[in-house]
Every structure is written in C-alpha cells, then in structure tokens.
Amino acid sequence: MRERHCLELPPVAARGDGSGDAGPGMRLTEYFLPTLKETPSEAQIVSHRLMLRAGMIHQAAAGVYSWLPLGFRVLKKVEQIVREEQDAAGAQELLMPTIQSADLWRESGRYEDYGKEMLRIRDRHDREMLYGPTNEELIADIFRTHIKSYRNLPKLLYHIQWKFRDEVRPRFGVMRGREFLMKDTYSFDVDYAGARRSYNKMFIAYLKTFARLGLKTIPMKAETGPIGGDLSHEFIILADTGESRVFCHKDLLAFDVLGTEVDYAADLQPMVDQWTSLYAATDDMHDAAEEKALGDRLVTARGIEVGHIFYFGTKYSKPMNATVTTVEGGSVPVEMGSYGIGVSRLVGAIIEAFHDDKGIIWPEPVAPFNVGLVNLRPDDRACAEAGDSLYRRLRRAGVEVLYDDRDERAGAKFADMELIGLPWQVVVGPRGVKAGTAELKRRATGGSEELSLDAVIDRLAG
RNA sequence: CGGGGAGUAGCUCAGCCUGGUAGAGCACCACGUUCGGGACGUGGGGGCCGGAGGUUCAAAUCCUCUCUCCCCGACCA
C-alpha cells in the first residue's frame, strides 16, 4: 500500500456526536433519522416503503431521491465493497463528469439514437449538453487521446458516478429511479482474446461483489444485440419479492465464490465455464424444453437484475477512431467491453432480499450500524450508566453503534430498531441492570439472550 | 408513449355529489401522570384546500386550463 499523505480526518460517523468518545457511533437524540409510523401512500414495493419509513431517503422529484444519513451510510458501504472488488480485479478508478457535451455523442451516432431517455440541456452559450446516461463516449475519448499502443493494454477503467435516464415511468423507489448511482467499468484490449480475459475478470469480480453483499447471485445469458457472441450476462440476485421470474439449475444455488481465492492473473475461463455451464434464464429467455429436461433439478425463483456486463468490440472505438498500433505496426480499433453495477439500486435490492413484516434485516457488511443499543430508561440513573458505558466501550472497540438514548416508550424504540434492521440489538433496561445484565438480540432470528455487560462487549467486539 | 387514479396540516385521510367561518387520527410544543413492545390527561401551535382563470352575494366544493405525483401496460442498471 502507498504511504498516506492526506490529512487524517476522524471517521465520518464520529463527527457530530458531542460525547467526546472515540469510535464510530451516534446517539439517536442527535442523529437525523426521521422514521415514519405510517406508510407514505406513493410507495408500492417493500423496499421503497421501508426506505421511506426507515428515514433513508427523501423523494425530490419523480425517480429522484435525496439520501438521508442512514441511507447514505448504506449506499457508501455498498459502493465501497463494489470498489474493493473492482480494485482487486485490477480495474483502476477514475471519475468522469455527469454533464457531457453533445459533440462526443454525435461522433458515436448516439446523440440522435438515444431518444428522450437522455436529458438534454443547453448552457448559457446555447451549447448542447446532456446529463450522462452512460459513459462509453467519454471513456473512449480519454482512451484515444492518451493510449496509442498495444503495449499499454489491457486496461480496465471504472468510475462510480451518478447517471440520469429520463425514464417514462420511474417506479419502485431507488430500484428504478431516473437518477441513480452506477459503477461502470470499461475494458480495452487489442484483440478478442484479450477482451474475453477482461470480460472474465469482471464476471468473477461481480460474483465476489454480490456474495460479499450477502446476496445469492445467478449470472444469466443476456441478449447480445448486434454484436453477437456469448459475451453478455445479466447478474440477477434472488429475492422473493423480485420483479421478474427466473429459472435455473438448482446446483447453481450451491456455488460459493466467497471461499475461493481468485488469482486474476490466471486463466479464469474454467471458473467462468463452471458458472455458465448450468441452465439459467430469465422469464423472457426461458426455454420450456430445458425446463422439461431438468425436471426437479429446476428451481423457479424471483430475482432483480443488479449488474450487466457485455463485450461490444469496436462499436464505439471505430466511429470515434480509438485505435492502437499492433505488434506488426498496423493500427486497429480497440476492443471494448462495459460492465455496470447499479449501486443505488442494490440498496433497494438488498432490502427486497432481506426484510420481514417489521422492517429491514441488514446483512452485516452493509448495515448502517452493526449494533443498535437501546436504553429503555435513559432517565433512570442505573440504566443511563449501564447504557452510556456500553456505548463508550463498544465505540472504543471500533463497533459501529447507534445508541437509542431517546426519552420514548419501549415499544416505540423496539419498533424503530426492528424497522431500521441493525444486525444486533443490545437492550438495557431496569430489569436487567439490577442483575448486571443486558439483552443481546439478533435481528435476523429474533433470538436473544441475557448476558453480563462484559460478555456483551466480548461478543460484539470479538 | 397509451390507459387509469390522486393532489386538503409533517404523515394517513375525511369533507366535494347537494357552494355558506376547514376537520379527525398520528406527529409537534408545554405541564402532569406514566414507563420491557408505537401510553394517558389538560392546554397549545400548524393549512391561501397544487397553481391560474372563470361562474356566484359567496368556491376546498361547480366549470376551464395548467403543474405535480402515483398506478397498469410497452422500455430499462
């Protein structure tokens, strides 16, 4: 790792808390968490309802949302996991702007083709601009300016940036917004074989990414459009309330990528083959003959598309003149591919996959806080001491903790805690404090146990 | 882009048909009683009824136009 020259800032979570304690935490009396008891009438699907009720987002316009502190924390965690897996696969992060010039899009021919989905803007000089729905043109322009030789290939470049697509009908909250946060990677190779290697890297990186988020993912062959070939896959995560029906071989569900150490420099084709050899299809691509052949090995489920990767060859490099010199000294348009993950959409998708009738059940890697510390009686001296002490010790141990020190009824606190779905709850009340214990509760199972305060720390900090 | 629905308090909604001083529950503020699963009492604050025209002595209510949001379908990360 490189040495750090940057200013050391306190962790984001630690700011704004006047307690003076070190460590990642927040007191609910100070936190901006506008939860709702009633469901706003506009929300239809469960993730949208829960995100509004849990105070994660606030609608700004149709399909456009502000991310409130709790939702923002989750978004950042998802983003960070996506980033880490891109970096691990050898992709390099950069940042392209949201606003683009129409000129580049004229070069590729897409300015006319894209239609009303593209938000077009004019600046004060009446120049035609647009809010980027994707970035192939921009990245191709960067590439052609700076890379000229096969010797500088391959390259995998990505950014995580807001996009805007003026959907006719945005819906499902952040799952189908008009403005959305997307990670898009672009690959550059001198030939098809190289493009395939890049494709495979992203394929595996995607499996890793979604697995780390706690999701079951199934890659499915997707329409390849005019390019043809077999290099296009959608990544579908399974969720009971998912938007589309999917079919697959049941053995796919047992595949585990988390335990596998991946060497991105090695040949990844065998691993990709393993994942693509078994049948998997979305509703519209489903083959009845396959269904029959599989019999009881076929699984029918519901899913949500959270990623899409595809190879498109010279579709943009040719018209935009992004070429490289070859070993032989000739010049060829660079082979490209693009690889997207809907980061903001994933937040909704994760909720679709993990919730119950009381609220969200966050997988630990993306939970906004790991522990919700509930003080049932902050006005009671013994409770306040026990609660404050636990809060301090958990933070010192580096545990992200949200401390409910509000003067509210027990029921309201429990309901809010279930709603925002932190993986662990620690309940401090007069009953336990007398015996020197607190209750440790797991959100996912509802199971709980009475432990001494020390045992609670050991368990959560361990 | 076709078809439907809705805009009244922060949220959920009633009132509109049949014009006559704008309501409820929750939320909010104060005080008191409560306190291990969304308490209770008393008092209080808050809305040009989405906007613009029109009809009328009088419009949340009737008429016209417009904006916004939501739902179903076709499309998409």
Image: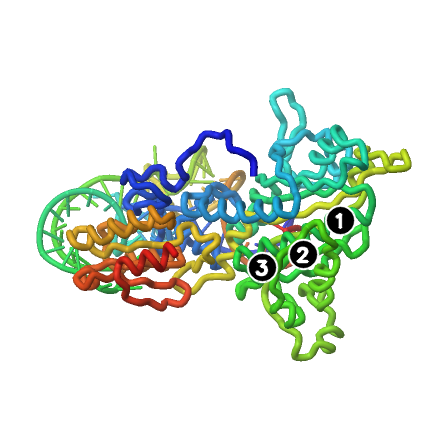
Identify the residue at horizontal 65%, vertical 23% (top origin). Answer: A126
Residue A104 shows in the view: yes
The nearer-to-camera label among 3 and 2 is 3
Q: How crowded is mark 2: few (under 14 residues within 10 Å), some or many (20 or more)?
A: many
Are discs 1 and 3 less than 8 Å apart at CB? no
* SS under mark 3: loop
State which tag comes first along the sequence, 1 or 3: 3
Among the 4 quarters of the image, the one containing residue A251: bottom right
Name the quadrant of the C terminus of chain A.
Answer: bottom left
Image position, residue B31 (x, y; %) = 10, 46
Q: Are marks 2 and 1 in contact (CB under 8 Å)?
A: no
Snapshot quadrant of residue B34 = bottom left
Asked if marks 2 and 1 fall on the same chain, the answer is yes
Q: What residue type is labelled 1?
A: Tyr
User: Are the residues under marks 1 and 3 on the same chain?
Assistant: yes
Which one is nearer the viewer's eye here, A139 or A300? A139
Q: In the image, what residue occupies the spot 76% across and 74% down?
A: A289
- Find disc 1 in the rendering and name its residue: A311
**Residue type (three-letter) at the residue carrying disc 3:** Leu
Q: Quick one: label 3, few (<14), some, or many (20+) residues within 10 Å?
A: some
**Does residue A133 appear anywhere in the picture?**
no
**A432 over A327 or under it: above or below:** below
State the residue position of label 3.
A258
Q: How crowded is mark 1: few (under 14 residues within 10 Å), some or many (20 or more)?
A: many
**Sequence-first tag of 2 and 1:** 2
The kind of residue tagged 2 is: Glu
Residue that label 2 marks: A234
Q: In which quarter of the image is the N terminus of chain A?
A: top right
Front-most of residues B35 and A203: A203
